[in-house]
Image: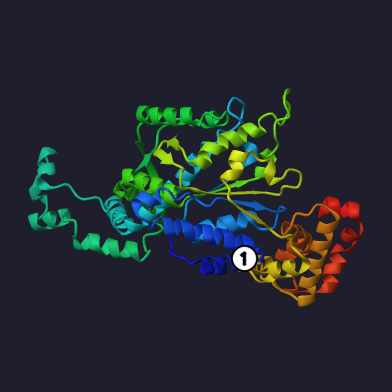
Amino acid sequence: MRELTPREVVAELDKYIIGQNNAKRAVAVALRTRWRRQRLPEELRDEVVPKNIIMIGSTGVGKTEIARRLAKLVDAPFVKVEASKFTEVGYVGRDVESIIRDITEQSVAMVRSEHSDAVMGKARAAAEERVLDALLPRRRGPVDRIQAHEQPEEEPMDWMHESYEAESPTREKFRKMLRDGKLDDRTVELEVREKGGMPLGVISNIGMEELEISLKEMMGNMFPEKTKRRSLKVPEAMKVLTQEEASKLIDMDKVSREAISRVEQSGIVFVDEIDKVAGRESGGGGGPDVSREGVQRDLLPIIEGSTVNTKHGPVHTDHILFIAAGAFHVAKPSDLIPELQGRFPIRVELDNLTEDDFVRILTEPRNALIRQYVGLLGTEGLDVEFTDDAIREIARIAASVNSRTENIGARRLYTVMERLLEEVSFHAPDAVQKKITVNAEYVKKQLIDITKDEDLSRFIL
């Protein structure tokens, strides 16, 4: 885990997320607490539990983005799930333990990629040899020719022995041509591995992940890997063979152990829409809310600390950081069952975004919307420039629509920007005028009818 102070974490998050300082500080402190725990003596380390967080705020204010950027910042395994897609055991729906299986798969992919990068040099060298073997087949030696009832004296012995050497001048000449890209138009025939097995996606749809894992392992033994002869261009052959050789050099047992350790020590699980399962049972009957409290009770042992079996091995969830989030428009955090509330000691409320916030969101972050649209239209040869008064007008319209209809936070900017530039985007490939200036007058002209008609703005924006 990267060693970042809370101040450094907040500074990094500020590059992508506007405002929400309380939430940023909370996640920064929780992250630093995890770093501190890993430096404690072993007997005390296991006693320190994660400082799980509940984020309370409307949609589009940055809850998910904070958690995602936090995980990316420290290269931690991260998974985002929605509480509403899980159901109580006994009902049709996903099992909550699949959360841990998903984050384990993410971690395995991360670690495998790192190990693959470490052996890429050796893998590329081995792939190069295989491509050269296909381009320049080694000639049969004297013994082979005798067995084929041919006379080895047909050619000089010294020339034949040279051709059997791996580093013959001809082979070295081809190697140089291969590295210089002069053989890219050549086609080679190769034996490429392909995995056997059966697709079992139907099983996961009915919440039987454990059965799916067992069946996949069994089918993997019944249908081992086999090879297939394929004709490939040299660049594609190099890519395929490099990946194949890298997979041979990677110790998957070591990858699995490291991935599980990374999940257990630095994994982050973001549980969105926690407010959707916050309803309490009203006694008797069924109905659509029948499993809400059941989902909370199923989530409890995962958050509290338990062992989940995955195909890579058992994963202990005691020190995974859980960040829950919800709008809590109808339900309140106190509507969660007391046991679950106790597992989220840190609660932080995110602010609704204002017009000034929208102006900053459009211009300041590294992934600012204005920057994105200028870059996208630039691929068509268009030079699009937004004036300051245009950016302010876009922000004003977004804030106004949010106040009069559903408040969807910064996501409103996407709908407004898309509508604003729809005409430009459509005609971009054929546009004669390559310089376009978007000012406040242009913004009003494009959006005035929609913003005036509330019913239309509900429908379009």
Which residue occupies 56% across, 58% down? 27
Mark 1, residue position: 367
Position of 312 compared to 342: left or right?
left
The answer to whether 361 appears left or right of 242 in the picture is: right
Instruction: Classify residue 451 as left or right of residue 194.
Output: right
Residue 343 spot, x, y in % from top left: 56, 45
Tell me the quadrant of the picture where the C terminus can be found: bottom right
Q: Which residue is at 41% across, 50% downward? A: 262
Specify the farthest residue to the top. Answer: 285
Percent from the top left, x then y, of residue 454? 90, 55
Give the class, few, some or many, for how many residues have Cα within 10 Å of label 1's Cα (few <14, many ≥20): some
- Viewer-closest of 335 and 409: 335
**Would you identify the image quadrant in which residue 183 lies?**
bottom left
Residue 297 shows up from this direction: yes
Would you place residue 270 above or below residue 61 in this image?
above
- Kindly state the secondary structure of the residue where label 1 is placed: loop
